[in-house]
Amino acid sequence: MSAMQSSLAAWIDGIGFIAPGLPDWPTAAAVLAGHQPYAAAPSVLPAPALLPPEERRRASRVIRLALALGQEAVAHAQADAATLATVFAASGADGHNCHALCEQLAGEDRQISPTRFHNSVHNAAAGYWGIATHSMAPCQVICAFDGSFGAGLLDALAQVVLERRPVLLISYDSEYPQPLHDKRPVPDAAGVAWLLSPRQGERSLARFTVERAAAGASLSHLAEAELDALRAQLSSLRALPALQRLARGQAGSTVVDYLPGYALELGLQPC
């Protein structure tokens, strides 16, 4: 980051969104634009239609979340998922599965099922996406605690700029049961997906830039307290101030946290 001399730029061609009370991007856009009030409710995670029925029944909350986000963004952009490079960014893995593994390992029967084990790894969602979409394109999986959205965005934009190809960023988080919840109080499952392209197309929504924020720059907030609480509690929803600008058709910049001591400035110019 210290060597970054200019901004990275791309076009946003598609968006996927899920958060408490906001089941998809059209609903979130209406709320962020002020066209309808926000109503808090548990996150709605659709059944992963991309998976075969047997796999669909066994899919965890994290898998359902990540696949739904990616599928909405791809559909929004009318893109071919099988051709897209992907970046998966999450501050944690599958909290419920982690809890179940800890419980079982603390008991007498420590025989872990293969399904539970392979769902416990951080790249499980990326694996399911690749299998479901038959994608052979490059895939990165990133974790940077509360800077996970920023880290994933930088990786995705770097690929767009250097490779001159579209990249699908899927940033997501899910809750942990107690007692882990006390240490990482993520309130619910949530996330955002952006399909980023090196050039403007018919489906492009905005031109997007990212650069290192000036030292001491204040993080961007939302005026609506409930929405800003989601931004603060879920690393993947650090994108909310930028998404609010997009929903309102307002050009401008927002600042999101990255690694400790660093922040990113996100510039947005709606089409």
Image (cartoon, rainbow, N blue to C red):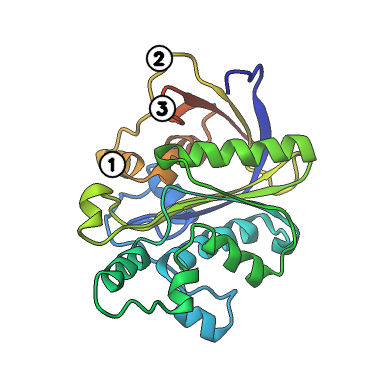
263, above or below 84, in the image: above
Q: Residues within 10 Å of mark 1 (few under 14, many from 20)?
A: few
Question: Residue 123: x percent and y percent?
Answer: 54, 58
Q: What residue type is disc 3 on? A: Pro
Residue drawn at point x = 54 percent, y = 21 percent: 212
Q: Quadrant of residue 132?
A: bottom right
> In the image, 126: left or right of 82?
left
Question: Residue 84: x percent and y percent?
Answer: 72, 55
Tell me the residue that label 3 is attached to.
Answer: 260
Q: Residue furthest top?
A: 215
Question: Residue 267: x percent and y percent?
Answer: 56, 27
Classify the position of the N terminus by image quarter. top right
Question: Residue 12: x percent and y percent?
Answer: 63, 42
Q: Secondary structure at mark 2?
A: loop
Tell me the residue that label 2 is attached to.
Answer: 216
Disc nearer the start of the sequence (2/1): 2
178, above or below 48, in the image: above
Q: Secondary structure at mark 1?
A: helix
> Label 2, label 1: how many angstroms apart (C-alpha)?
22 Å
> Label 1, label 3: how many angstroms apart (C-alpha)?
20 Å
Tell me the residue that label 1 is attached to.
Answer: 229
Q: What residue type is disc 2 on? A: Gly
> In the image, 124: left or right of 31?
right
Q: Nearer the viewer, residue 268 or 151?
A: 151
Residue drawn at point x = 53 percent, y = 37 percent: 151
Q: Secondary structure at mark 3?
A: loop
Q: Which mark is residue 82?
A: none
Q: What residue type is disc 1 on? A: Ala
